[in-house]
Image (cartoon, rainbow, N blue to C red):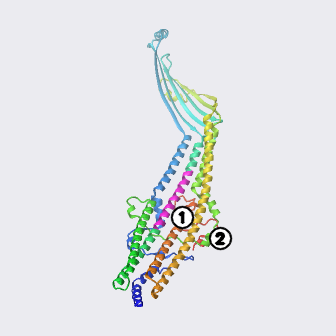
Amino acid sequence: MVKKFIRLFFLAFSLLVLPMAANVFAAEPASLAGGKTDINATAPKPALQKIPEISLSDAVLKTLQANPGIFVSQEKVVQSEGLRQKAAGQFDWTVRTRASADHYKAPLDSYDSQTALAYSQLNNIPYDDYLQEDTNTYSLGLIKQFRSGVTVAPNVAVVDYKTNADFKVPVSRSEMRIEFNVPLMRGLGAQATGAEELAAISQTKASRLLARQNIAQIIYTTSINYWNSLAAKMSFELTADTQERSKKLLELVEKLVRTGSLEPAALNQAKANSLSGQVDVSAGETDFYRSRQALALAMGMTLRELPDAPNPGSQFPHVINAAIFNQVDISQFIDEALKNRGDYLAAQTDIETAKTLLNKAQNDTKPKLDLGLKLGYAGEDEVSTSSRYFNSVGRNVTGLNSYVSLSLELPIANNAARGNMIYRKSQVREAQLIQNDLSNRIASDILVAYRALSSAINEHQLASESEKSYKKAVEFENQKYKAGSSTLTALIDIEDRYFRARLAAIAALRKYSAAMAQFRLVTGTMLDVGDKTLNFDERKLLEFPVINQAGITNDTVKK
């Protein structure tokens, strides 16, 4: 009787359950020799087909086009360029012009009044009992400070004078001169006078380098969210598929229990297995939705686009050859990172900026000794018409006139300059300490990323072996069940273990992909240093970077 029951149950189970299990478990997982795992090829569920897919390269492209962090980095560069232009304005040519009219009237004293009256009667001219003077001036000139510290100021000035104190015609006097101011101590040389501009130029360079590193960080964030979403999608699909099989198993057990071919206790176990699977499907769907939203935010999608967060359509990258990977000289990656990483190069630029400002601060402690020199000509014109305003420049010209001066400013305590120099010296030391600390951190990050990548390769290998072993175990358990030497509980348990092994294989691929992106980021190989257009190549996230490694190429590190 027992044998008859076993045969009936196995017959029903074989007809309904084993074909589905064979379809699910038929694909062979990837081995160390090459190929992709079967989990990459899991067929999308109908619910996922409605979600638009996006490739890894398109996700990165969307990030570069829409992520707010990209625009913030670009604005930082624009701001630094504005400050550089502002600092360069110190050496612009400046036009200086001035015009004035002075009208002056004053009463005459008794002596001057009698003299003026007698003069007017003698010459038969009108008598004025007041003094009137009209002085009109205008000037036009340029001034420029050169980066050497020398200031040049050419200038033309005209003074027109008219009075009723005598009866001469109005006179206009002009002066054409050029002035030089040459600093002999403080302010001499481009390192002193042009220090602010040189510092601004360095800061512009640093902002560009930091922007590039920030963009690499943003691309890294997008890639991590992409791999997380892809893993969540594949895990959800696998969970949903397993739950579908549990549902069919439950239906089969219910029929067998109703016919009396199976004890009711088996139905409780099947129900528990199905309900547990439903919980896993719901949680997996939520995780997948959450990961899609994280990816959409990393890509810079707007609030109107977020409801249609994309579905990752690419596959996980090939896992590199572990034997070749272990031959990598990691010290060369550290050296290359210090040559290429934008944040480290920006730290070097900060040291240059601090030294430039220190040179100026040291120069400011010197006495201010300036040599002044003026060279020019003078002209004059005496006519009643207004043409004298302009003709005086070219008539009755005399010269060469000259003026030489030497001025000295010598602060006694000079606390302001000395205090500023102490401040700037400290800034140089601070910038050097920051750079040294950053270099140590970069080296440590690379060593950790290398170890994490090595660990991810090993975990993927173990997960793949585990998946294959459990697949064989499921097949063997089915054979035992067919022979009547196993139970439904044992079969469900081994299939659950196989399910967990496949989830672990997905997690191992996700971890490897994230470790590869992390290694690219910390080694400064995410973006090409000389590329100004940000034409990102997705291979930077899929392949191991090869730099000056003897006998190692991209082909040799691939499985």
Q: Which mark is residue 37?
A: none
**Residue at (47%, 17%) from the top-left corner?**
164
**Marks 2 and 1: in contact by CB < 8 Å?**
no
In the foreground, 189 or 112: 189
Magenta stretch secondary structure, dominant? helix
Where is mark 1, residue-wise? 517
Q: Is residue 188 visible?
A: no
Q: Residues within 10 Å of mark 1 (few under 14, many from 20)?
A: many
Q: Secondary structure at mark 1?
A: helix
Amino acid type, callout 2: Gly
Would you place residue 4 above or below residue 84 in this image? below
Would you place residue 253 above or below residue 203 in this image? below
Would you place residue 31 above or below residue 95 in this image? below
Q: Secondary structure at mark 2?
A: loop
Q: Position of residue 413 (x, y in %)?
A: 64, 32
User: Gap between marks 1 and 2, in whole Å?
Assistant: 23 Å
Amino acid type, callout 1: Ala
Q: Quadrant of residue 185?
A: top right
Which residues fall within the magenta stretch?
205-230
Left or right relative to 81: residue 310: left
Q: Position of residue 143 (x, y in %)?
A: 56, 36
In the foreground, 515 or 199: 515
Where is mark 2, residue-wise? 551
In the foreground, 170 or 369: 369
> Which circle's residue, 1 or 2, is located before the other in the chain?
1
| Placement of the N terminus among the 4 image quadrants | bottom left
In the foreground, 266 or 245: 266
| Placement of the C terminus among the 4 image quadrants | bottom right
Q: Position of residue 542 (x, y in %)?
A: 53, 68
Q: Residues within 10 Å of mark 2 (few under 14, many from 20)?
A: few
